[in-house]
Image (spheres, rainbow, N blue to C red):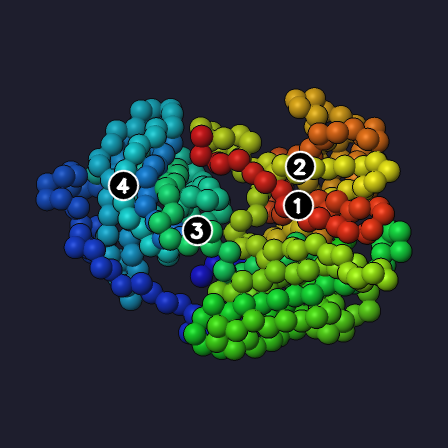
Amino acid sequence: MHWRSGRVWIGLLAGWLAVAAATSALAQTAGRDPEAGSPVAGGVTYVDLDHPVTSSGELRMWRVASSAGARVMLKVFRPEGERLLLVGTSALQTVPAGGVATFSCSIPVARNDLIGCYCPDSTCADAFADGLVLAADGDVGTSPSSLFSTGIGSPSIFAAGSHLADVPATASTDLVVPVVGRTPGLGGTVWRTRLELFNTAAVETTVALFLNLSDRDNTTPAASAQVAVPPRATLIVEDLIAESFGLDEAVGSVDVVASAPVIAHARIANVGSEIGTFGQAVPGLPASWAVDDEDVPGFNPNGDRLYLFEARQDAGFRTNLGIASVAATPLTVEVRAMLGEQTVGTPLTLTLEPFSHTQVNRVLGEMGVPPGMSGVRLEAAAAAGSGGRFFAYISRVDNGSGDAVFLLGERESVMP
């Protein structure tokens, strides 16, 4: 179970670790050869304990970076009590020196399986530099990148595949609602947020809600609440900011941390009209879907960029841009307005504190994009070296009615 730093409370920890049993006929204890006589004796297997597989499916491709060249084999392990069971392997492959090698495979995997790299040669550790583990959203893979922790020169190994289950896996124990609000707006609009939580489990689920206010450090949340959702039931909070957090006015994001997977979505509605309400639906997103500044050789260099379409600013509509940070570190996001391959206006640089949220109203005007320009898109990416992760969205508001449409940033596949 992987939690973002600062978003766990002790009351929900007990009894959460569910270890899957190995069902494959190929199951073996860690370190044993997948086939008698395959690899040469004297090798070593590196198992990445920090980045388990995020969703069940079939592993179909893996890549290894090597500075000096080596023979390698991908292994998949399944935790069972104190043991790691070997449930699948690739063929033994040769990696050329100084490059990134790509290999195909077909290995069924389950959520929380562990990825390892077997080197049959005793000098294998010297052939690699410390590396990163990559997760491609939409692919079976590992959790977001961080260094291996062996400290002795472990391999850089990247794995991806195709989901057989949990697609799309919007149910999660760690969700982010990128924007919520209770505030007056332009043109006489009055915004309120309604939150709905669906408990996917057959038992009562405890859910913690953490409010992250805009433009401040939320390492300590601005407010929090705890609710219980009955089995397979939906809990509705009509006025989230006032009812759950006791505030008359606030704008920010909300983290949803639960004892079992839940599905969440919000409706931010303008209640200031005499003829009814107008609102926008905002989904609760698994925190693991957030993007960072990762740029790995051999992978799509645009895979860490978010695209926001339908940005519009004219007499009829205005567009607001929002960024929600999901990490306990500061974050810098660079935003460009594009028309085809041409940059228009002036790029925007936004700096966010940990777990913060920011919104730039009438963003196209702030960037100097000429009014009425059609087909403009925004592109948002974390600045190089920025350690945080984020979601981006635009809210396009009808100036006449106050009706708003929520549009989440889209991304390309990380895998080429």
Residue type for callout 2: Phe
Kind of element beneath mark 1: strand
Q: Which residue type does callout 3 highlight?
A: Val
Say whether disc 2 or disc 4 marks the residue closer to the N-terminus: 4
In contact (CB < 8 Å): disc 2 and disc 3: no
Q: Which residue is mark 2?
A: 309
Lower position in the chain sequence, tag 1 or tag 2: 2
Q: Earlier in the sequence, mark 2 or mark 3?
A: 3
Mark closer to the observer (4, 3) = 3
Q: Residues within 10 Å of mark 1 (few under 14, many from 20)?
A: some
Instruction: Say if mark 1 contacts mark 2, CB within 8 Å.
Output: yes
Q: x, y percentage for residue 385?
A: 61, 38
The span from disc 2 to disc 3 (Cα, nearest Å) is: 24 Å
Decide if residue 252 is in sight here. Answer: no
Residue 228 x %, y %: 56, 77
Q: Residue furthest left?
A: 36
Q: Which comes before the other along the chain, label 1 or label 3?
A: 3
